[in-house]
Amino acid sequence: MNENSILLKMQDISKSFPGVLANDHVTIECEKGHVLGLLGENGAGKTTLMNILYGLYQPDQGKIFVDGKQVVINSPSEAINHGIGMVHQHFKLVDTLSVIENVILGIPTNKAVLDFGPAKKKLEKLCKEYELFVDPEEIVWRLPVGKQQWVEILKALYRDCKVLVLDEPTAVLTPSESDQLCRAIRKITEQGRSVVFISHKLREVIEITDKVTVIRDGKVIGTVNTKEATQSILAEMMVGRPVTIERKARPIIKEHSAVLVMKNVNAFDDRGVQALKDFNLTVHAGEIVGVAGVDGNGQRELSECIAGLRKPSSGSITIQDKQVTNVIADPSFVGFIPEDRQKTGLVLDFTVAENLLIKDYKEKPYVKNGFLQYSEIKKHAEHMIKKYNIKSPSGDIKVKTLSGGNQQKVVIARELDAQPVLDVASHPTRGLDLGAVSNVHDILLNERNRGAAVLFISAELQEVIALSDRIIVLYSGQIMGELDGETADQFTIGQMMLGQTTEAKK
Amino acid sequence: KEQVDMTGSVAMVLSGLKTDQAFNQYTYEGMLRAASEKGIKTAYKENVTDAEQVEVIRQLAQQGYEIIIGQGGQFGDSLATVAKEYPDTHFIFSVGKDTYGLPNMSAATVSYSEAGYLGGIMAAHSTKTGKVAMITGVFYANQAQMRDSFKKALHDVNPSIEFTAIETNDWSDTDKAYNATNALIAQGYDVLFPCLDAAGAGVAAATDDSKNKAVLVGSVADYAETYDCKSAMGSVTFNWEGLGYLEATGELTDGKSHVVGMAGNGISAIYNNLSSEGVAAVEKAKSDLSAGKINIPD
Amino acid sequence: MTYEIILDWLQASLRWSAPLIICAMGEIFAERSGIINMGIEGIMLCGALCGVAVSYYAQSQAVALFACAILGLVLGLIVAFLTVSRRTNQVVTGLMINLLAIGATNVIFSVLTVMRHKRATTFGALFPESMHRIPLVGPVLFAQPFTTWIAIFIAFIASFVLYKTRWGLNVRAVGDNPQATATAGLSVIKLKYQTLILSSIAASVAGGILTLASSGYFAAGGMTGGRGFIVLAAVVVGGWDPMRTMFACMLFGATDAAQLRLQTTESIIPTQFLQMLPYVITVVALTIMVKRSRVPKTWGAAYDGRRS
Amino acid sequence: MRTKEKIIKVPFIGDLIYSSGHTIVGILLGIFTGGLLIAISGVNPFLAYASMFRGAFNSLQSFSNVLVRSSPLLLGGIGVAIGIKSGVWNTGIEGYMYIGAIGATIVAIPELGLPPIIHILLCFIVAMLFAGLWGAIPGYLRAYKGVNEVTATIMLSYVAIYFTNWIVSGSPLAQEGAYFPMSLPFAKSSLLSILMKGTSLHPGPFIGLLMCIIFHIILKYTPFGFRTRMLGHNPFAAQYAGINSKKQIVITMVIGAMLGGLGGAIEVLGLKHRLYMEFVTGVGYESVAVALVAGGEPIGVMLSALFFSILKVGGATMSIETGVSSSMASIIIALCVLFVIGVGVADSKRLKKRDEKDPGKKTLSFKMEEAVK
Ligand SMILES: Nc1ncnc2c1ncn2[C@@H]1O[C@H](COP(=O)(O)OP(=O)(O)OP(=O)(O)O)[C@@H](O)[C@H]1O
Ligand SMILES: Nc1ncnc2c1ncn2[C@@H]1O[C@H](COP(=O)(O)OP(=O)(O)OP(=O)(O)O)[C@@H](O)[C@H]1O
Ligand SMILES: [Mg+2]
Ligand SMILES: [Mg+2]
């Protein structure tokens, strides 16, 4: 290989956090005009590595070379100066500012007064060039997530980066938006720039990258030429064993009464935009209804309305003929796994034991004579830790010190242990690695088989198809179509997710 | 425990700062003069809050100070409380009149009512618009007494003079005093009678800035001298320094209430721009007051 | 007569609010960047003393205000070091700065005995005497001391800087999303230092103007009388927007000026109830304006410097 | 099993040593800087500090002064701390104290012919009722209207102060012809008794300490406390768990206000036996500082309230004995607190930050974990 053509090299990088060795002598290389894929399970250390490249963290050891020259990067502005651009896993946009303001934020200039004219022109040129269209004047929070992703990419391109890092850019994109992104990436590399592409979606990785480096537990497992790789090879490198998410056989449930009935529900989101429009849905006992759709199309409002956290502006929601009026905090009636476990589902500063009871803390054995019975609470925690195989030394440690998968198990244990009549699971596998995902799938399937009605919301088509008896596709607060889980295919759902009804396609 | 000779010792507790350009500062300075002249051992604690009054007074009594002066109307109850515990120590309630019936507690103040009356005569002879105003921080009993006799004097000179009074609620906020004075001047009040401690400077400044729309009759301090006030017609000054001196030298420890007026040199009238007619009227009022011809409550 | 009283009231409202406006403009930037500078009350107090003292010794108001600015810079650095670098609680820090300022000004003023009874030279009106007699605008606007005009000018400048300049953009960004600002290549810490220093300078200069535009005297014992807290309230009422905050300050000035004027009317309402008026109005204004204002997202929170 | 024990227990003690070490360094730095200033002002700092120490600890009597002064700080501090626990800034303690004292005054003045205990309890109850209603205003505005509570409570405190001024100078409760605005004297049966002869020690500080312990227990061991903490740590999760967060905010603000009101009532019933104008000036902000230095923990409030009152009482004695001005005493208090929060670990995040900067020097917990392995 020609040494000169290597645009980026990170050599022997190590980085540890308290109790975690996030990067262990990691070396990666990326040639000019190439796309390097970075693969690895959650917590493998991909983001940490890229944050080191971007100057957000300092490595404990190791060197970075850009264009053959060794560089020391102490801050994002130095990274930018070295031509490194990064699109972060979690958006780094100031959502109260407009697109153009976000784009020019932090760009060094000797002009004190803002002049958007030239910036807008340059941005519009970039939009055209890469076919990533956004309105420069729009305030960021008003944009759908996909467009926000474009802003992030344009922001990096605007700074003329040589190396563009994309950390899980497609997690929030529809299939067709992902395709659009792939086209943009090709254009970027055609100009001699390099791209580091991080994704959990093997299909995309194979489609877009030139080489793939797989990281596990902070160590590089290996680097392969994409041409020689297949999905199953990569998956095995990643996890250490072959894994797939496949539809499992399921018994037919006789009992089939309607549990959740939503009639003409309208609801608004936090910004006052209508999020559910005349929404009708019935979920029966013993079935899993999968809700597919791009994030931000009303999924969150849907689940919150059912759980009573959000008041619909009109329409009715009943669960077993009981009208939903207030927050339902009774896990023996409705189990609700919220989409953001850290923000909504858990109190991170509480212990595992306390978190297991944030809904039932005033119930009988845990409260006696008006006082909390910590011995009972502890006993309950130990029981649950064993039953749900939560990796926690005891119930007394703070939940924030658990890993993501185990945090999720705490939520699941709390919500599903009392055998609710209705389970609402909103993105229950988000951020979990493959093993944990199949574990959650098994739990939900068992719930269905037990006779619970399950509403399963996810943006991952593969798992929606694998798990659901019935699939509805949500677009812009409305149901675009309904499919049978046995026969549904990704392509049709993908089309519907973009707002095209199957009829319209025909 | 070492034995310190406490004969001829005096302590003073101040409600405000010893630099407040008002009764705290001047009484304190009187005590210092007594100390240097007579070799008296002194102690003081300034800015004593409500919650610490008893504690501080008791501490001083315990240390053996023979005379303890509480400088401010808020000290009465606390002085009495400690006076009961320390019958051999003398307590002086300064700026108050109540001795709480205790033999070891005396009270001493200057005569606010005489001051008000003299100020009123000056003001009545200075006004052209017939509108006179008093500015104070808060109307404590003394200020209220001063106001009443001031009003009486105005009325005695000319019953048609309009009078108003206004509180700024802050004894050190010169800016607020300045603005309050402007408010009065704009409403046609042309004689201002401040009783405002350090914030009085703001009144002086505002009258000077009023382009001869208003004049000032000072109280407590000599406004012409202290604040360089050009528009001062005169001032009724309080001899706090003298009072502090008397208190510290032990001349007021007879268990009685002392109101030091003109006779005892507690207050005096100073003339700056006052007309000769006005000066004459004040002099007459002075003699009438000492003759007891004018009935004002003390 | 009533006409004149109203004109005078308007004039007083503006004059009274000038130092508040100047102080508030700085505070807006600090709070927009996510930091509550609760110490402005104390800093203003220091500025008041500094203004009078330097004006007395140097016989120049320009030098006095410059000295206030330098003092504000130093105090701002201290506040910034504590709240930004040491990440101390902003509220305790501010309250302790206030306590420190009261103590320090008392001590220093007690040393400066020579100037205690001397009036510092104060600002005159900006416009010639003849213009003061123009009906309506004359007394209300042209008779204002020069500092009132400065205050209004500063409010416009603040608005311009906040919305139309690079730095203003950075400040708006950092308070809402410091992580994003950091990844855009800006130094969050530096920005917060800058806004805190700015707000401290503004407070200090406002203190200088407080005394130099009116009485020209300092008095020991905390003569700012809670103006710093009023400013904090005005910034919230004004929704962190310079123009609206300016009006909030003026509203407060107007009610306080009105309250002083109402005291002279022979009304049955006790004076204490009139004195409450500005504070009651502020709470009412706060309640009315709350829907229209948006708190900077990291208002009052310490910046962690790590991924959120 | 062994690992478990180590991981849970050791870091707590380790952090405690770490943070109290920093606190002591902070206090020392504050005292050192203050000493420099004292020396500059021409007083021997060693003598000054010796008399400061004597003022607070010389005898039971001087320590009783510390206790007496801590009473409003304890009650105010715990009032603020409960707010912090539920995520609101209840900065209006001074106002609650005034309003509470007014309530107490109304029932304390008339001779009701009640036994002292009952009369005092009645005063307390009315005080808490008044203050609670007053606190409900910013509580309601915050919870249901989204009005910023810091601003609202500070503004309402001013209103309360002026209202008190009227009560003691213009209302029928005011003492006519008094030299300072004050109310009529209270009935004998309403006064708190003096616990130690020759001091002002009344039961107030013990009520304060008791309240700290009670609220420690309430917060830790009752469902109400569970709810409050949950709301403070994560309002979204609290809502999700079915807690009516608006109601909870109003309740905690009202409780904070009631504690403040109780503190005000104790001051007037225990010390001056009348309602005075400006009887608690500055205590409101001090309470906020007390609660924040304590990190919002009731037990910490006990310590930090005592710390503040030691500084205040000692500072007063220092002023009397050495002539250091009272302003210098407040400068020293401010410096001590600034150094404590600046150097100390009032904020647990700083621990983590240290670890992140210097991964080699991990917290004790991790070291122990490794050692056990
Ligand atoms: N700031 C931090 N403090 C402590 N530990 C951290 C920190 N950041 C990352 N880690 C830990 O470092 C490891 C690597 O995390 P990183 O975010 O790099 O993983 P990743 O490969 O990007 O995972 P994902 O696929 O979930 O994005 C994890 O164990 C994580 O818990
Ligand atoms: N802030 C933290 N403080 C202490 N330890 C942490 C912290 N964050 C993460 N860890 C530790 O880092 C490890 C990895 O965390 P991470 O969340 O990345 O796990 P993961 O690999 O994603 O696991 P899972 O498969 O369960 O999701 C965990 O064991 C956790 O205890
Ligand atoms: Mg990642
Ligand atoms: Mg994880």
Image (tube, coloured by chain):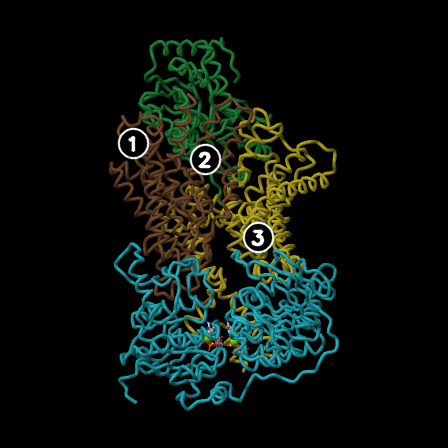
Q: Is residue A341 visible?
A: no
Q: Amino acid at mark 3?
A: Gly
Q: Amino acid at mark 1?
A: Ala
Are discs 2 and 3 both within one chain?
A: no
Quadrant holding the N terminus of chain A: bottom left
Is disc 3 surrounded by few (<14), some (14 to 19) or many (20+) residues within 10 Å? many
Query: The chain drawn cyan is chain what?
Result: A
Query: The chain drawn green is chain what?
Result: B
Q: Colour of chain C?
A: brown
Residue topped by disc 3: D83
Residue topped by disc 2: B16
Q: Is residue A188 visible?
A: yes
Is disc 1 surrounded by few (<14), some (14 to 19) or many (20+) residues within 10 Å? some
Q: Which chain contains the residue that carries disc 2?
A: B
Residue A236 % position (x, y): 50, 88
Q: Which chain contains the residue that carries disc 3?
A: D
